[in-house]
Image (cartoon, rainbow, N blue to C red):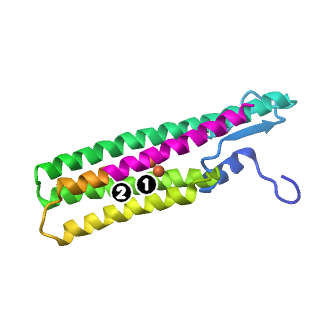
Amino acid sequence: MSGQIRIGGNQLLQLLGKKSGWCDIPKIILTSAKNSAIPKQLPISQIEAIILKPYDPRRFMEEIYGSLSKHLDSHIQEINHQHIHLASLIQELATISSKASDRYTTHQKLKEFLEFTSHHFAFEEKFMCQHNYPDFATHHQNHNQLLTETNTLVSEIVNGSQPIQPKTVDLLKRDFFDDVSDDERYITFLKKVRTDLMR
Ligand SMILES: [Fe+2]
Ligand SMILES: [Fe+2]
């Protein structure tokens, strides 16, 4: 760094690791050090590549494209894993409602579904914002609608005397799978970003 501030690579990485906007960003180190011990001094798990100077600009660009592409792929993979988990939660909820289980069991499962759904939507939306997803506003609205619907169901179970009806779970299931279809468009967008990177 220039001016009065001097900071080592290791220290810089530690600072970036603590910043929410920076911690998940892939990092590539360019260094003039020719010492093979460099990797031992740095938190390797946070680093995509270490390029020693003098460096080949083509290799530098390849590393950037490669790490961005990896980052996109792992995001898509994580979305798919989270959908599988949510689908199994909603299936368990359907089973619970078909057996007319007690309110406590239903409440616990519904809360679990609500918490994981909130986490999942936040995960998608953060990445959508970072990548200027053009349908973000509509997608966000649909997410909010599903969260409101689930929240209402949770309060109805807490305050009401009726167990959750299978028909209600069917509606929730339909809205959840509608969102998964919307996500397919989002994933297609991400795959296009990845393809454009490689041109
Ligand atoms: Fe989703
Ligand atoms: Fe979504």
**Residue type marked 1:** His
Answer yes or no: is residue 63 visible. Answer: yes
Left or right of 50 on screen, residue 101: left
In the rendered structure, which segment of residues is drawn in magenta?
Answer: 174-199
**Where is residue 50 drawn, in percent x and y?**
73, 33
Looking at this rendering, what residue extends furthest in the bottom direction? 159
**Where is residue 48 drawn, in percent x and y?**
66, 35
- Label 1 crowd (10 A; few <14 / some 14-19 / many >=20): few
Q: Is residue 149 above or below residue 45?
A: below
The residue that disc 1 covers is: 119
Left or right of 8 on screen, residue 156: left
Instruction: Give the residue drawn at x 79%, y 32%.
Output: 60
* Foreground residue among 7 and 28: 28
Instruction: Give the residue drawn at x 38%, y 61%.
Output: 147
The reply to whether the residue tagged 2 has its Cβ within 8 angstroms of ligand 1 is no
**Residue type marked 2:** Glu
What element does badge 2 sit on?
helix
Q: Is residue 106 above or below residue 64?
A: below
**Where is residue 187 drawn, in percent x and y?**
54, 41
Tags 1 and 2 touching, CB below 8 Å: yes
Q: Which mark is residue 79?
A: none
The image quadrant of residue 52 is top right
What element does badge 1 sit on?
helix
Whether residue 180 appears in magenta in the rendering, the answer is yes
Magenta-drawn stretch, dominant element (helix, strand or loop): helix
Instruction: Give the residue drawn at x 64%, y 37%.
Output: 192
**Where is residue 152 drawn, in percent x and y?**
30, 67
Q: Which mark is residue 115?
A: 2
* Foreground residue among 162 and 27: 162
- Check the picture and name the quadrant holding the C terminus: top right
Using the numbered discs, state the Cα–Cα distance from disc 1 to disc 2 in whole angstroms: 6 Å
